Amino acid sequence: MTISVCTLAHGRDAHLTNLVHGLNHSNRPPCELVVAVMQDTRYELPATSFPIRQVMLGSSGFCLAEARNLAAQSARSDLLVFLDVDCIPSPGLLEDYATASAFNDGVLMGEVGYLPKGATNAGIDFAKFESVAVKHSERAGPPRGMVGKCGDYRCFWSLNFALRANTFEQLGGFDPRYVGYGGEDTDFGRTIVSKNVPLWWARGAKAYHQYHKHHMPPVHHLDSVLANATIFADKWGEPTMQHWLRAFRLMGLIERDDSGGWIKLQEPREEHLALTRQHEHQPYASSSVVLEQLEAQASLGKEASRAPATTFA
């Protein structure tokens, strides 16, 4: 079985360089790395024993879904392994995916460990990465066996996954109508279910996610989340990203319209960015933590409004 690794990149030169260094440590090197370059200049990357093909898309007009589809179409192998540019593959990642896919049809999602800030400053050190990386609290743990069934399509995660090239073609790729942030992964997961393709958690196949600043829920992508939520609801007849939308509503940023959709009431302010911002001591940002805070504040506000007025003689 031949293996192509596919990634998308815009900026983040150091992160992509570390991804390549990680592949250089692979127990089973890939047949190629395909980089969908979403900028006007090529990357200067480390030497490898395998070819790196940079597919130049330019800096205008391409969305993540289109770039991911073009990377897959450009790949030449039987098995496609998709990694975000922020990921450093463990030495066993490709070998684990090859073994799991040999016995299981469908889409496989490997493990992810989140690295704190500065973890990569001294270069690639997998023993160190393993000692400091943490699992995301909102993601499932590894299955007991080689694979475990994922029963909820909303858990599909494009950060680290693999599937056969003919399966990607069967699924039709990612829907390019999703522009900007939000919705495209869930849509792909929903497509997987609609095509009766198995969706698996894979044990191993671990990638280490490199630190970068982020917001969760992604209030800095409010407009695209609203637009993509509408696309998903129109396409599938059911809502998506409800926890993010609930948080935005509690922040006073959006409200329901008469048709059941969403309208924006105001632009996010610094207080909203501060609430959702990932701090430097955090390896990842958590939507659940922020939503719990907002729900608690809303509950206190309701209790205060129900309290009897105090009168003074």
Image: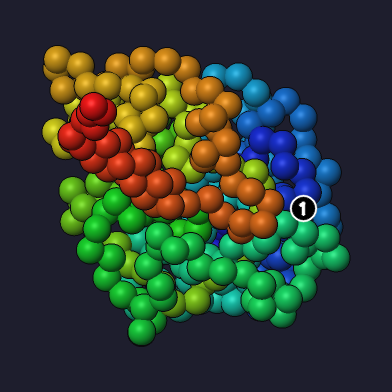
Q: Quadrant for residue 124, please give it.
A: bottom right
Which amino acid type corresponds to the residue marked 1 in the rendered image?
Answer: Thr
Residue 178 located left or right of residue 272: left
Work out whether residue 57 or residue 112 is closer to the camera in this orientation and state it: 112
Residue 164 at x, y = what percent?
A: 40, 59
Residue beneath the point at 27% across and 42% down: 299
Q: Looking at this view, is 56 or 298 the one in front?
A: 298
Q: Is 282 drawn above or below residue 24 in the view shown?
A: above
> Residue reaching furthest front?
313
Return the residue nearer the eye: 8 or 116.
116
- The total number of labels drawn is 1
Give residue 107's position: percent from left, percent from top: 35, 61
Residue in the picture at 26% in, 28% down: 312
- Which of 160 and 31 lies nearest the eye of the viewer? 160
Residue 24 horizontal side relative to residue 188, left or right: right
Look at mark 1 in the image and give the residue it sits on.
17
Circle 1 crowding by C-alpha within 10 Å: few under 14, some 14–19, many from 20: some
Q: Is residue 274 above or below residue 108?
A: above
